[in-house]
Amino acid sequence: MAAVPAILDRVQDGVWKKVDAKGGLTKKLFDFAYARRISAINGSWFGARGIELLLWNFVVFRKVQAVLGGRIRFLLSGGAPLSGDTQRFINICLGAPICQGYGLTETCAGGTFSEVDDPSVGRVGNPVPCSYIKLIDWPEGGYLTSNSPMPRGEIVIGGPNVTVGYFKNEAKTKEVYKVDERGMRWFYTGDVGQFHADGCLEIIDRKKDIVKLQHGEYVSLGKVEAVLVASPYVENIMLHADPFHSYCVALVVVAQPALKELASKKGIAFTDFAELCEKEEIVKELQASLLKAAKAARLEKFEIPAKIKLLSDPWTPETGLVTAALKLKREAARKAFSEELSKLYQS
């Protein structure tokens, strides 16, 4: 089965919500079985094999596996970073390994691909046979090939799979395509990565997503968004920062079922969902949830959005705010909500 990370995230969220809704013994059993499998993956022999592994799969996880047919042997993921939590969830609940790939349209999808028996998270594997990959220094972002313990830098891909350039866009082609003295064509991806000792590549940042704040701190927008989207009330999020302010703000597309449930628990009355998103008490609850996720990931204070705007309408490919793979179109969202972003800095 092949899926983009956003779909796998939704599978995970859906399962956890159903488990939480059932509560009681069902939740306790699921949590216990999941913890045992996590321990096994992390090196403990408890829950790793034999009768116990078969027991958890039969009693607990086969119901999750049945949702997707019950016959999945492995999954392919690409198009965006896959969180470690989601990868582990799929490994345990679906009982299948995940192979991650990295590549771009400009490289005919060729780049790297992980081995099916690689249990690590966050890595996208070794270079495929048709590709050459190197890292180059990016001093402004602090990523250098001399970094310890692993070399870091902008990812550059070369080889016969690299396309000749952009159609009728010579300026852009000259900017990101280079040919070396041996005649090999290289594409400068704009992604930042690091090589592990075994030759596996890990994507850790993107040059365009790094913004310098007023007082000199650097914020990686994509990294922070990947952390904050873990909040149960968040369906999508766009962090915004610029060099003229000392703090970040965020547009939060809220998860309707979770927010309505929160309003019911708090006894908050509303006539429509858009009205609920404007209520001060709800905004404070969302900020608290984001802060909790940020602290769990040990984000710096300047990386946490100081102000947020809740959005009631989902972002779909039809809105032009996300791609078909559900990746954020940052510039499109920034233009569409420029007024809201300005108000966040004014208020």
Image (spheres, rainbow, N blue to C red):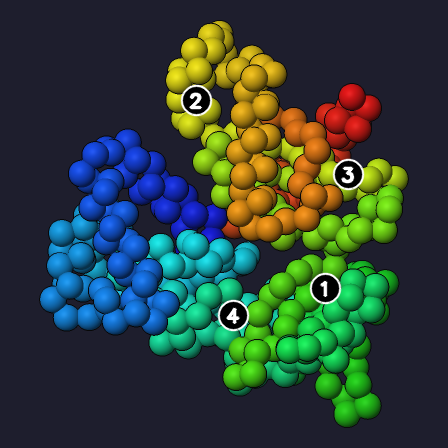
Q: Nearer the viewer, residue 168 or 332?
A: 332
Instruction: Work out how far the residue at label 2 is from the one at label 4, CA to CA, in angstroms.
Output: 37 Å
Whole-percent x and y of residue 246?
82, 40
10 Å crowding of disc 1: few (<14), some (14-19), many (20+):
some
> What's under tag 3, amino acid-wise?
Tyr
Instruction: Work out how far the residue at label 4 is from the one at label 3, CA to CA, in angstroms.
Output: 32 Å
Can you identify the residue that label 4 sits on? 124
SS assignment at label 1: strand
Q: Are marks 1 and 2 in contact (CB under 8 Å)?
A: no
Whole-percent x and y of residue 57?
18, 58
> What's under tag 4, amino acid-wise?
Val
Whole-percent x and y of residue 286?
55, 28
Q: Is residue 98 above or below residue 214?
A: below
**Among the two numbered marks 1 and 2 on one chain, the one whose residue lies closer to the N terminus:** 1
10 Å crowding of disc 4: few (<14), some (14-19), many (20+):
many
Can you identify the residue that label 3 sits on? 247
**Among the two numbered marks 3 and 2 on one chain, the one whose residue lies closer to the N terminus:** 3
**Among the two numbered marks 4 and 3 on one chain, the one whose residue lies closer to the N terminus:** 4
**In this rendering, the label closer to the viewer, 2 or 4:** 2
SS assignment at label 2: helix
Q: Quadrant of residue 333?
A: top right
Instruction: Work out how far the residue at label 4 is from the one at label 1, CA to CA, in angstroms.
Output: 16 Å
**Among the two numbered marks 2 and 4 on one chain, the one whose residue lies closer to the N terminus:** 4
Instruction: Work out how far the residue at label 1 is from the one at label 2, CA to CA, in angstroms.
Output: 40 Å
**Among the two numbered marks 3 and 1 on one chain, the one whose residue lies closer to the N terminus:** 1
**Among the two numbered marks 4 and 1 on one chain, the one whose residue lies closer to the N terminus:** 4
SS assignment at label 3: loop
Can you identify the residue that label 1 sits on? 190
Q: Nearer the viewer, residue 2 or 207?
A: 207
Can you identify the residue that label 2 sits on? 262
